[in-house]
Amino acid sequence: MYDESSIGARLRSLRKERALTQEQLAEASGVSVDLIGKLERGRRSTARLTSIAKLAGALDVEVSALTDKRERLGRDRDGGSVLALRDVLTSPSLLPGFDADDPGEPTPMDRLERAVGKAWADYWAGNFGEVLAALPGLIGEARVTREALGNPAVQPLALAYEVASCLAAQIGRADLGILAAERAVNAAYGGDDPLLWACMHWSYAWVLFHQDRYAEAETVVVKMAEKIEPGFRGTDMEVAVWGSLLTTAVAPTVAQDRDPGEYLRLAGAAAERIGGRMWVYRTSFGPATVAMQAGYGYAVLKEPAKVLEASRRIRPGDLKGISWGAHLMDVAQAHLDAGHRRTAATKLLEARQVSPVWFRHQRVARQVTAEIREQERRLTPETRTLVKALKLDD
Protein backbone atom coordinates (compact mmCIF):
# COMPACT_ATOMS: atom_id res chain seq x y z
CA MET A 1 0.00 0.00 0.00
CA TYR A 2 1.16 3.54 -0.73
CA ASP A 3 1.75 5.42 2.51
CA GLU A 4 -0.24 8.65 2.17
CA SER A 5 1.59 10.14 5.18
CA SER A 6 5.06 9.68 3.66
CA ILE A 7 7.37 12.38 2.40
CA GLY A 8 6.92 10.95 -1.10
CA ALA A 9 3.13 11.29 -0.95
CA ARG A 10 3.38 14.88 0.27
CA LEU A 11 5.97 15.67 -2.42
CA ARG A 12 3.80 14.17 -5.17
CA SER A 13 0.68 16.00 -3.94
CA LEU A 14 2.41 19.38 -3.80
CA ARG A 15 4.08 18.87 -7.18
CA LYS A 16 0.75 18.04 -8.81
CA GLU A 17 -0.97 21.00 -7.14
CA ARG A 18 1.58 23.21 -8.88
CA ALA A 19 1.13 21.40 -12.21
CA LEU A 20 4.81 20.42 -12.37
CA THR A 21 6.26 17.28 -13.88
CA GLN A 22 9.05 15.49 -12.04
CA GLU A 23 11.47 16.81 -14.65
CA GLN A 24 10.30 20.41 -14.16
CA LEU A 25 10.61 20.10 -10.39
CA ALA A 26 14.09 18.65 -10.78
CA GLU A 27 15.12 21.57 -12.96
CA ALA A 28 13.62 24.16 -10.59
CA SER A 29 15.14 22.62 -7.46
CA GLY A 30 18.46 21.28 -8.65
CA VAL A 31 17.55 17.87 -7.20
CA SER A 32 17.89 14.86 -9.48
CA VAL A 33 14.75 13.53 -11.11
CA ASP A 34 15.91 10.07 -10.02
CA LEU A 35 15.67 11.04 -6.33
CA ILE A 36 12.30 12.72 -6.85
CA GLY A 37 10.99 9.60 -8.56
CA LYS A 38 12.27 7.27 -5.83
CA LEU A 39 10.73 9.42 -3.11
CA GLU A 40 7.35 9.59 -4.83
CA ARG A 41 7.32 5.83 -5.54
CA GLY A 42 8.22 5.06 -1.94
CA ARG A 43 11.55 3.49 -2.88
CA ARG A 44 13.23 6.16 -0.75
CA SER A 45 11.61 7.41 2.44
CA THR A 46 14.18 10.08 3.32
CA ALA A 47 16.66 12.46 1.73
CA ARG A 48 19.36 14.84 2.87
CA LEU A 49 18.17 18.04 4.51
CA THR A 50 19.79 20.09 1.75
CA SER A 51 17.82 18.17 -0.91
CA ILE A 52 14.55 18.49 1.02
CA ALA A 53 15.15 22.22 1.46
CA LYS A 54 15.74 22.64 -2.28
CA LEU A 55 12.54 20.76 -3.09
CA ALA A 56 10.57 22.80 -0.56
CA GLY A 57 11.95 26.04 -1.98
CA ALA A 58 11.00 25.07 -5.52
CA LEU A 59 7.49 24.20 -4.31
CA ASP A 60 7.25 27.42 -2.26
CA VAL A 61 6.54 25.63 1.02
CA GLU A 62 8.40 25.19 4.28
CA VAL A 63 10.45 22.04 4.81
CA SER A 64 7.91 21.01 7.45
CA ALA A 65 5.30 20.59 4.69
CA LEU A 66 7.39 17.69 3.38
CA THR A 67 8.76 16.30 6.64
CA ASP A 68 5.52 16.43 8.65
CA LYS A 69 6.88 18.61 11.44
CA ARG A 70 3.90 19.08 13.72
CA GLU A 71 2.94 19.13 17.37
CA ARG A 72 3.03 15.59 18.80
CA LEU A 73 2.43 16.13 22.51
CA GLY A 74 -0.61 13.87 22.53
CA ARG A 75 -1.62 13.03 26.09
CA ASP A 76 1.60 14.53 27.49
CA ARG A 77 0.24 18.08 27.47
CA ASP A 78 -0.02 18.39 31.27
CA GLY A 79 -2.94 20.75 30.82
CA GLY A 80 -0.98 23.00 28.47
CA SER A 81 -2.48 24.65 25.42
CA VAL A 82 -0.77 25.88 22.27
CA LEU A 83 -3.67 28.28 21.79
CA ALA A 84 -3.11 29.74 25.26
CA LEU A 85 0.53 30.31 24.37
CA ARG A 86 -0.54 31.93 21.11
CA ASP A 87 -2.93 34.21 22.97
CA VAL A 88 -0.36 35.45 25.47
CA LEU A 89 2.18 36.10 22.71
CA THR A 90 -0.34 38.05 20.63
CA SER A 91 -2.19 39.83 23.42
CA PRO A 92 -3.77 43.14 22.31
CA SER A 93 -2.34 44.69 25.49
CA LEU A 94 1.02 44.75 23.70
CA LEU A 95 -0.24 47.15 21.06
CA PRO A 96 1.06 50.73 21.38
CA GLY A 97 -1.34 52.87 23.37
CA PHE A 98 -3.42 49.92 24.55
CA ASP A 99 -3.99 49.87 28.32
CA ALA A 100 -4.68 46.57 30.00
CA ASP A 101 -7.81 46.54 32.16
CA ASP A 102 -6.14 44.87 35.14
CA PRO A 103 -2.35 44.69 35.04
CA GLY A 104 -2.22 42.83 38.38
CA GLU A 105 0.47 42.86 41.03
CA PRO A 106 4.16 42.28 40.25
CA THR A 107 5.63 38.93 41.25
CA PRO A 108 8.51 39.06 43.75
CA MET A 109 11.75 38.82 41.80
CA ASP A 110 13.06 35.73 43.60
CA ARG A 111 9.83 33.85 42.88
CA LEU A 112 9.76 34.98 39.24
CA GLU A 113 13.39 33.94 38.69
CA ARG A 114 12.72 30.51 40.23
CA ALA A 115 9.71 30.05 37.93
CA VAL A 116 11.76 30.97 34.86
CA GLY A 117 14.52 28.64 36.01
CA LYS A 118 12.05 25.77 36.40
CA ALA A 119 10.64 26.36 32.92
CA TRP A 120 14.12 26.13 31.47
CA ALA A 121 14.98 23.05 33.56
CA ASP A 122 11.82 21.35 32.31
CA TYR A 123 12.65 22.36 28.75
CA TRP A 124 16.15 20.86 28.88
CA ALA A 125 14.70 17.73 30.48
CA GLY A 126 12.23 17.40 27.60
CA ASN A 127 9.16 17.93 29.81
CA PHE A 128 7.44 19.87 27.06
CA GLY A 129 3.92 19.49 28.43
CA GLU A 130 4.91 21.09 31.74
CA VAL A 131 6.64 23.97 29.97
CA LEU A 132 3.64 24.58 27.73
CA ALA A 133 1.31 24.60 30.73
CA ALA A 134 3.46 27.08 32.66
CA LEU A 135 4.33 29.55 29.89
CA PRO A 136 1.15 31.64 29.51
CA GLY A 137 1.02 32.49 33.21
CA LEU A 138 4.79 32.90 33.45
CA ILE A 139 4.98 35.33 30.54
CA GLY A 140 2.05 37.29 31.93
CA GLU A 141 3.67 37.56 35.36
CA ALA A 142 7.00 38.56 33.87
CA ARG A 143 5.36 41.32 31.81
CA VAL A 144 3.59 42.80 34.83
CA THR A 145 6.77 42.64 36.89
CA ARG A 146 8.82 44.26 34.14
CA GLU A 147 6.25 47.06 33.91
CA ALA A 148 6.38 47.62 37.68
CA LEU A 149 10.07 47.15 38.45
CA GLY A 150 11.82 48.08 35.22
CA ASN A 151 15.34 46.83 34.42
CA PRO A 152 15.64 44.24 37.22
CA ALA A 153 12.85 42.24 35.58
CA VAL A 154 14.14 42.47 32.00
CA GLN A 155 16.15 39.25 32.19
CA PRO A 156 13.36 36.97 33.44
CA LEU A 157 10.97 38.42 30.86
CA ALA A 158 13.43 37.91 28.00
CA LEU A 159 14.23 34.37 29.17
CA ALA A 160 10.53 33.52 29.49
CA TYR A 161 10.00 34.61 25.89
CA GLU A 162 13.12 32.70 24.83
CA VAL A 163 12.00 29.39 26.32
CA ALA A 164 8.64 29.92 24.59
CA SER A 165 10.42 30.39 21.26
CA CYS A 166 12.52 27.26 21.75
CA LEU A 167 9.53 25.13 22.75
CA ALA A 168 7.42 26.39 19.85
CA ALA A 169 10.15 25.55 17.35
CA GLN A 170 10.56 22.07 18.85
CA ILE A 171 6.88 21.20 18.54
CA GLY A 172 6.51 22.43 14.99
CA ARG A 173 5.09 25.90 15.65
CA ALA A 174 7.88 28.03 14.23
CA ASP A 175 5.28 30.73 13.50
CA LEU A 176 4.82 31.26 17.24
CA GLY A 177 8.52 30.62 17.83
CA ILE A 178 9.67 33.53 15.69
CA LEU A 179 7.20 35.86 17.40
CA ALA A 180 8.39 34.80 20.86
CA ALA A 181 12.02 35.14 19.79
CA GLU A 182 11.38 38.67 18.52
CA ARG A 183 9.71 39.52 21.82
CA ALA A 184 12.77 38.17 23.65
CA VAL A 185 15.15 40.31 21.58
CA ASN A 186 13.04 43.43 22.11
CA ALA A 187 12.65 42.81 25.84
CA ALA A 188 16.41 42.43 26.27
CA TYR A 189 17.07 45.52 24.15
CA GLY A 190 15.04 47.53 26.63
CA GLY A 191 17.38 46.59 29.47
CA ASP A 192 20.94 47.42 30.41
CA ASP A 193 22.68 44.09 29.63
CA PRO A 194 24.07 44.05 26.07
CA LEU A 195 25.18 40.41 26.40
CA LEU A 196 21.64 39.30 27.24
CA TRP A 197 20.44 41.16 24.15
CA ALA A 198 23.13 39.44 22.07
CA CYS A 199 22.14 36.03 23.44
CA MET A 200 18.53 36.40 22.43
CA HIS A 201 19.67 36.50 18.81
CA TRP A 202 20.79 32.89 18.85
CA SER A 203 17.25 31.77 19.65
CA TYR A 204 15.93 34.09 16.95
CA ALA A 205 18.38 32.53 14.48
CA TRP A 206 17.46 29.02 15.63
CA VAL A 207 13.80 29.64 14.85
CA LEU A 208 14.76 31.12 11.47
CA PHE A 209 16.60 27.85 10.87
CA HIS A 210 13.39 25.95 11.67
CA GLN A 211 11.64 28.15 9.11
CA ASP A 212 14.23 27.00 6.54
CA ARG A 213 15.65 30.55 6.30
CA TYR A 214 19.22 29.34 6.51
CA ALA A 215 21.10 32.31 5.06
CA GLU A 216 19.20 34.73 7.30
CA ALA A 217 19.82 32.57 10.38
CA GLU A 218 23.54 32.50 9.68
CA THR A 219 23.66 36.24 9.03
CA VAL A 220 21.88 37.11 12.30
CA VAL A 221 24.31 35.29 14.57
CA VAL A 222 27.45 36.16 12.61
CA LYS A 223 26.63 39.87 12.60
CA MET A 224 25.88 39.77 16.31
CA ALA A 225 29.13 37.90 16.97
CA GLU A 226 31.03 40.58 15.05
CA LYS A 227 29.27 43.27 17.07
CA ILE A 228 30.28 41.85 20.47
CA GLU A 229 33.59 40.17 19.55
CA PRO A 230 35.68 40.34 22.74
CA GLY A 231 39.14 41.85 22.70
CA PHE A 232 42.22 40.48 24.40
CA ARG A 233 40.88 41.55 27.79
CA GLY A 234 37.34 40.27 27.21
CA THR A 235 35.61 38.64 30.17
CA ASP A 236 34.79 34.92 30.19
CA MET A 237 31.10 35.78 29.76
CA GLU A 238 31.83 37.89 26.69
CA VAL A 239 33.91 35.06 25.22
CA ALA A 240 31.21 32.49 26.00
CA VAL A 241 28.44 34.53 24.38
CA TRP A 242 30.62 35.13 21.31
CA GLY A 243 31.45 31.42 21.06
CA SER A 244 27.80 30.44 21.50
CA LEU A 245 26.76 32.68 18.63
CA LEU A 246 29.37 31.09 16.38
CA THR A 247 28.25 27.55 17.24
CA THR A 248 24.69 28.58 16.40
CA ALA A 249 25.92 29.43 12.89
CA VAL A 250 26.90 25.79 12.27
CA ALA A 251 23.39 24.40 11.60
CA PRO A 252 22.33 26.97 8.96
CA THR A 253 25.77 26.72 7.35
CA VAL A 254 25.61 22.97 6.77
CA ALA A 255 22.00 23.31 5.64
CA GLN A 256 23.45 25.40 2.80
CA ASP A 257 25.83 22.50 2.04
CA ARG A 258 28.92 24.35 3.30
CA ASP A 259 31.64 23.22 5.67
CA PRO A 260 31.33 24.82 9.15
CA GLY A 261 35.03 24.42 9.93
CA GLU A 262 35.84 28.09 10.40
CA TYR A 263 32.98 28.67 12.84
CA LEU A 264 33.96 25.55 14.77
CA ARG A 265 37.61 26.64 14.90
CA LEU A 266 36.76 30.07 16.31
CA ALA A 267 34.21 28.66 18.77
CA GLY A 268 36.74 26.02 19.81
CA ALA A 269 39.28 28.74 20.57
CA ALA A 270 36.68 30.51 22.71
CA ALA A 271 35.95 27.29 24.60
CA GLU A 272 39.67 26.72 25.19
CA ARG A 273 40.00 30.24 26.54
CA ILE A 274 37.26 29.53 29.09
CA GLY A 275 38.71 26.12 29.92
CA GLY A 276 35.47 24.34 30.78
CA ARG A 277 31.70 24.54 30.74
CA MET A 278 30.24 27.94 31.61
CA TRP A 279 26.59 28.84 32.15
CA VAL A 280 25.37 31.62 29.89
CA TYR A 281 22.00 32.66 31.30
CA ARG A 282 19.93 29.46 30.91
CA THR A 283 22.22 27.52 28.57
CA SER A 284 25.88 26.60 28.64
CA PHE A 285 28.99 26.88 26.51
CA GLY A 286 32.24 24.95 26.52
CA PRO A 287 34.31 22.37 24.59
CA ALA A 288 31.47 19.83 24.68
CA THR A 289 29.08 22.38 23.12
CA VAL A 290 31.47 22.90 20.23
CA ALA A 291 31.96 19.14 19.80
CA MET A 292 28.21 18.61 19.84
CA GLN A 293 27.69 21.16 17.07
CA ALA A 294 30.54 19.62 15.07
CA GLY A 295 28.78 16.27 15.39
CA TYR A 296 25.54 17.73 14.13
CA GLY A 297 27.17 19.58 11.26
CA TYR A 298 29.11 16.63 9.94
CA ALA A 299 26.14 14.29 10.39
CA VAL A 300 24.17 16.54 8.02
CA LEU A 301 27.11 16.61 5.59
CA LYS A 302 27.33 12.78 5.72
CA GLU A 303 30.86 12.62 7.12
CA PRO A 304 30.46 9.93 9.80
CA ALA A 305 34.13 9.69 10.73
CA LYS A 306 34.15 13.36 11.75
CA VAL A 307 30.95 12.89 13.75
CA LEU A 308 32.39 10.00 15.72
CA GLU A 309 35.66 11.85 16.25
CA ALA A 310 33.74 14.82 17.67
CA SER A 311 31.76 12.47 19.91
CA ARG A 312 34.98 11.17 21.47
CA ARG A 313 35.69 14.70 22.72
CA ILE A 314 32.52 14.66 24.82
CA ARG A 315 32.98 13.18 28.27
CA PRO A 316 30.21 11.50 30.29
CA GLY A 317 28.10 14.19 31.93
CA ASP A 318 29.28 17.01 29.65
CA LEU A 319 25.87 17.21 27.99
CA LYS A 320 22.56 16.98 29.82
CA GLY A 321 18.96 16.29 28.91
CA ILE A 322 17.85 16.91 25.36
CA SER A 323 21.30 18.23 24.41
CA TRP A 324 22.66 14.76 25.11
CA GLY A 325 19.72 13.20 23.30
CA ALA A 326 20.29 15.38 20.25
CA HIS A 327 23.94 14.35 20.16
CA LEU A 328 22.99 10.67 20.39
CA MET A 329 20.76 11.15 17.33
CA ASP A 330 23.68 12.59 15.38
CA VAL A 331 25.84 9.65 16.46
CA ALA A 332 23.06 7.32 15.31
CA GLN A 333 23.03 9.03 11.90
CA ALA A 334 26.82 8.62 11.68
CA HIS A 335 26.66 4.92 12.53
CA LEU A 336 23.93 4.37 9.94
CA ASP A 337 26.01 6.16 7.29
CA ALA A 338 29.00 4.03 8.26
CA GLY A 339 26.95 0.85 7.83
CA HIS A 340 26.42 0.12 11.54
CA ARG A 341 22.64 -0.25 11.43
CA ARG A 342 22.14 -2.04 14.77
CA THR A 343 24.35 0.45 16.61
CA ALA A 344 22.37 3.30 15.06
CA ALA A 345 19.12 1.82 16.38
CA THR A 346 20.66 1.37 19.83
CA LYS A 347 21.76 5.00 19.94
CA LEU A 348 18.28 6.15 18.97
CA LEU A 349 16.76 4.10 21.77
CA GLU A 350 19.22 5.71 24.19
CA ALA A 351 18.15 9.12 22.93
CA ARG A 352 14.50 8.23 23.45
CA GLN A 353 15.19 7.47 27.11
CA VAL A 354 16.06 11.14 27.64
CA SER A 355 12.46 12.17 26.90
CA PRO A 356 9.92 10.24 24.80
CA VAL A 357 7.91 13.45 24.29
CA TRP A 358 10.90 15.37 22.94
CA PHE A 359 12.04 12.34 20.91
CA ARG A 360 8.90 11.97 18.84
CA HIS A 361 9.22 15.60 17.66
CA GLN A 362 12.71 15.04 16.22
CA ARG A 363 13.18 15.02 12.45
CA VAL A 364 16.55 13.25 12.70
CA ALA A 365 15.07 10.40 14.74
CA ARG A 366 12.28 9.93 12.23
CA GLN A 367 14.69 10.10 9.30
CA VAL A 368 17.20 7.62 10.71
CA THR A 369 14.47 5.20 11.79
CA ALA A 370 12.87 5.38 8.34
CA GLU A 371 16.23 4.60 6.72
CA ILE A 372 16.83 1.65 9.05
CA ARG A 373 13.37 0.28 8.31
CA GLU A 374 14.01 0.69 4.61
CA GLN A 375 17.22 -1.35 4.82
CA GLU A 376 15.95 -4.21 6.97
CA ARG A 377 14.29 -7.11 5.23
CA ARG A 378 12.84 -8.20 8.56
CA LEU A 379 12.45 -5.59 11.28
CA THR A 380 14.43 -6.13 14.46
CA PRO A 381 12.76 -5.62 17.85
CA GLU A 382 14.71 -2.35 18.21
CA THR A 383 13.40 -1.02 14.92
CA ARG A 384 9.84 -2.05 15.71
CA THR A 385 10.10 -0.17 19.02
CA LEU A 386 11.35 2.96 17.24
CA VAL A 387 8.68 2.81 14.55
CA LYS A 388 5.99 2.53 17.21
CA ALA A 389 7.50 5.27 19.40
CA LEU A 390 7.70 7.69 16.46
CA LYS A 391 4.31 6.61 15.11
CA LEU A 392 5.76 6.23 11.62
CA ASP A 393 2.87 4.00 10.60
CA ASP A 394 0.20 6.52 11.65
Image: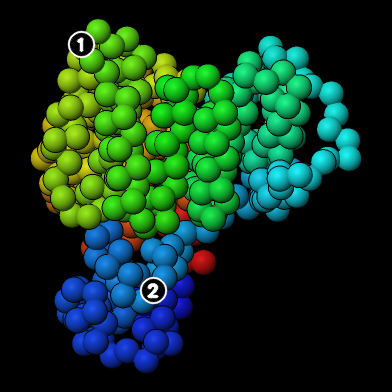
Residue 27 seen by the camera: yes
Q: Residue drawn 85% across and 29% down?
A: 104
Marks 1,2: beta carbons within 8 A: no
Q: Residue drawn 69% across and 12% down?
A: 110
| Secondary-structure class at tag 2 | loop
Residue 271 seen by the camera: no
Check disc 2 and give the amino acid type: Asp
Q: Residue drawn 24% across and 60% down?
A: 50
**Image: 135 above or below 393:** above
Residue 204: x and y in percent read 45, 42
Q: Sort mark 1 into few (<14), some (14-19) or many (20+) by Cα contacts within 10 Å.
A: few
State the residue in front, 113 or 179.
Answer: 179
Measured Cα–Cα span from mark 1 to mark 2: 46 Å
> Relative to 17, is 299 on the left or the right?
left
Q: Residue drawn 18% across and 73% down?
A: 30
Residue 89: x and y in percent read 66, 46
Which one is in front in this view, the residue at disc 1 or the one at disc 2? 1
Q: Label 2 belongs to which residue?
A: 60
**Image: 30 above or below 79:** below
Check disc 1 and give the amino acid type: Phe
> Relative to 107, is 349 on the left or the right?
left
> Relative to 162, is 252 on the left or the right?
left
Q: Label 1 belongs to which residue?
A: 232
Q: Which mark is residue 135?
A: none
Residue 326's quadrant in the figure?
A: top left
State the residue in front, 380 or 86.
Answer: 86
> Relative to 130, is 62 on the left or the right?
left
State the residue in front, 384 or 56.
Answer: 56
Residue furthest to the front: 97
Among numbered discs 1 and 2, the one appearing first in the sequence: 2
